Image (cartoon, coloured by chain):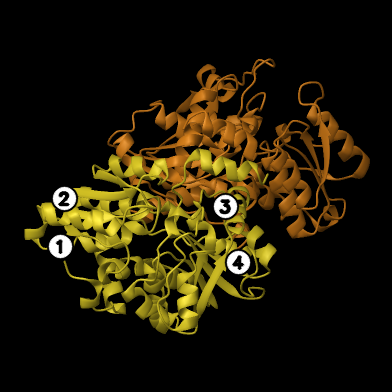
Chain colours: A yellow, B orange
Amino acid sequence: MAGPSDLQAPSFADVKAAAQRLADMAVVTPLLESSALNKRIGGRILIKPENLQRTGSFKFRGAYNKLSQLPEAARHAGVAAYSSGNHAQGVAAAAALLGMPATIVMPADAPRIKIENTRGYGAEVVLYDRYHEVRDEVAAKIVAEGGATLVRPYDDPDIIAGQGTCGLEIAQQAEALGAKLDAVLVCCGGGGLVSGTALALAELSPSTAVYSVEPKGFDDTARSLAAGERLRNDPAARSICDALLAPTPGELTFALNKQLLAGGLTVSDEEAAAAMAYAFRELKLVIEPGGAVALAALLAGRIEAAGKVVALTLSGGNVDAESYCEILTARS
Amino acid sequence: MAGPSDLQAPSFADVKAAAQRLADMAVVTPLLESSALNKRIGGRILIKPENLQRTGSFKFRGAYNKLSQLPEAARHAGVAAYSSGNHAQGVAAAAALLGMPATIVMPADAPRIKIENTRGYGAEVVLYDRYHEVRDEVAAKIVAEGGATLVRPYDDPDIIAGQGTCGLEIAQQAEALGAKLDAVLVCCGGGGLVSGTALALAELSPSTAVYSVEPKGFDDTARSLAAGERLRNDPAARSICDALLAPTPGELTFALNKQLLAGGLTVSDEEAAAAMAYAFRELKLVIEPGGAVALAALLAGRIEAAGKVVALTLSGGNVDAESYCEILTARS
């Protein structure tokens, strides 16, 4: 199978084309504003709630953009993907809509809701051990055996362009509100959402500073941006942000991020959990740990936002009630 | 003080005027759609999430519409209100924005988040015993002593017109989506939100059937609609829907509802709790018990919605983490 090295990074035109493919398929999530949050920060905060997206995270955008472009001949053999759960659901839902079979390799310790929902969209789920098996190899075996097309979670131009529609909407919706964006904070695992978002903003709002936000121990993008080259995380690192545990930045995503991002921010698990509790109490939105890191960076003061207009993504809301309530009740 | 009998029911023009007063003050909450919910019901369901409204419920709409019209001479003495918590927050937030003092009479067993938030907006909170004191009398004493203007929770034309802006937005947003509404389900306590919503729909979408939804034991509007006269609830009734425990329909609200509603639906506490858990899992929205009854009626099949376009309000999201998690974990 072709590696990402063979692939070209997408352009803004690819993001616009993705938006056309996604029309009537993905939710145009609103850009929300909370007077409580504005008051706390002393700025104007615009919230992009991708937890309200189809499948409960932004991942449907990239998955549908990719799958809807597969040639007719490839559709019958279907698709395969490896994912901690949100890409899994995105690929499974897109495959179901397009009538393709899907096989998804997921860590056995993924949140139950993610595994159940992926199966619920009709995909076959193959579980693996996150800490002792290499998911790429498990997926490669499935691809070799059945001829399915592998759908990478972020290192693919069609995936990046699809996620970029989230940034396109942020730019358009902010403009409709008459808001000139000083900064955008984007949750970051492999970097698909932030690179796509940065592509859209570079074109539509070039003075806006775009930041990736990662959990501590998985701050490979922040460190790689500072070093100018792709660095890896310590394999012993752990985080509650199950959606953001990529080992290293993607090749394509990092090529874009290196060029387009203002920097990378990092938050602790405790800060992510506190942001989830804040979103419960003040925003009335259910956010998963990985979906809360951009809000966490804002609440923890990682950037100066007073007097500024700052947009942030809440990238997903797929969390089990048990984990969610453990986090809420410890902070109420 | 003047009783509701002296007052005229509002008209559609009053709802439109309220919308102008609320511009830039209230949130124009989005009209959301969930493919998971559409699939489950087999219809097109449009969700009006008033939990995303300023103060976490629709109540800010009516409160701001009322307070912003108080004559200059009345502003100094401020306002008083009795409320189980959402009207309290609405009045307190509106008073703070308009620079008026506010005193709010609240049941001592109201959710902690509602009491804390009301105080957080700067209001003075007076607690009373829901089952042994009459809140109207406690509030009347405050009004008599300090000259504050009493802001009734629903039986007031300015309050009803303000809540009606929620219905106005539903009608306008549904039209923008090209959706012709067959029915609208509205959470109902004293009937302010449903009567205001019905006023807006009667004008903008007269073929739409508007239903009130109440919890069992507090189905005074449903029974009153059937009987053609205002009936009271059994004082011994209890429900988890703390926002919807009005003893009897309002005079003004019932005059409108009798004329405009297609009927009244009722759900059990268990159905309301199941709808909260559904909203957590599938919609990623935090809903309080009283805010979940319209969704509960839909999920429980109280109206035939297959093949139909149905809008529903999620009227509030002010719930303590502890109560919320008790409900979620029992159903996950």
Amino acid type of the residue tagged 1 in the rendering: Leu
Would you say the residues marked 3 and 2 are in contact, meaning their CB atoms lie under 8 Å apart? no
The extreme left residue here reads A73
Q: Which residue is mark 2?
A: A100
Measure the C-alpha gap from mark 2 to mark 1: 10 Å
Which quadrant would the N terminus of chain B be assigned to in this image?
Answer: top right
Q: Which residue is mark 4?
A: A298
Chain for mark 3? A
Q: Is residue A203 left or right of residue B169?
A: left
Instruction: Pinpoint residue B78: horizontal percent, then vertical percent.
Output: 83, 50
Classify mark 4: residues with Cα within 10 Å, few (<14), some (14-19) or many (20+). many
Q: Is residue A180 left or right of residue A307?
A: left
Chain for mark 1? A
Measure the C-alpha gap from mark 3 to mark 1: 37 Å
Classify mark 2: residues with Cα within 10 Å, few (<14), some (14-19) or many (20+). many
On the question of residue B160 being in view, the answer is no
Amino acid type of the residue tagged 4 in the rendering: Leu
The residue that appears at 40% across and 63% down in the rendered structure is A246
Would you say the residues marked 2 and 1 are in contact, meaning their CB atoms lie under 8 Å apart? yes
Q: Which mark is first along the chain, 4 or 2?
A: 2
Vertically, is A291 above or below A114? below
Q: Which residue is mark 3?
A: A276
Instruction: Pinpoint residue A226: horizontal percent, then vertical percent.
Output: 50, 81
Q: Which mark is first along the chain, 1 or 2?
A: 1
SS for dot 4: helix
SS for dot 1: loop
Q: Which mark is first along the chain, 4 or 1?
A: 1
Amino acid type of the residue tagged 3 in the rendering: Met
Classify mark 3: residues with Cα within 10 Å, few (<14), some (14-19) or many (20+). many
The residue that appears at 49% across and 49% down in the rendered structure is B168
Would you say the residues marked 4 and 3 are in contact, meaning their CB atoms lie under 8 Å apart? no
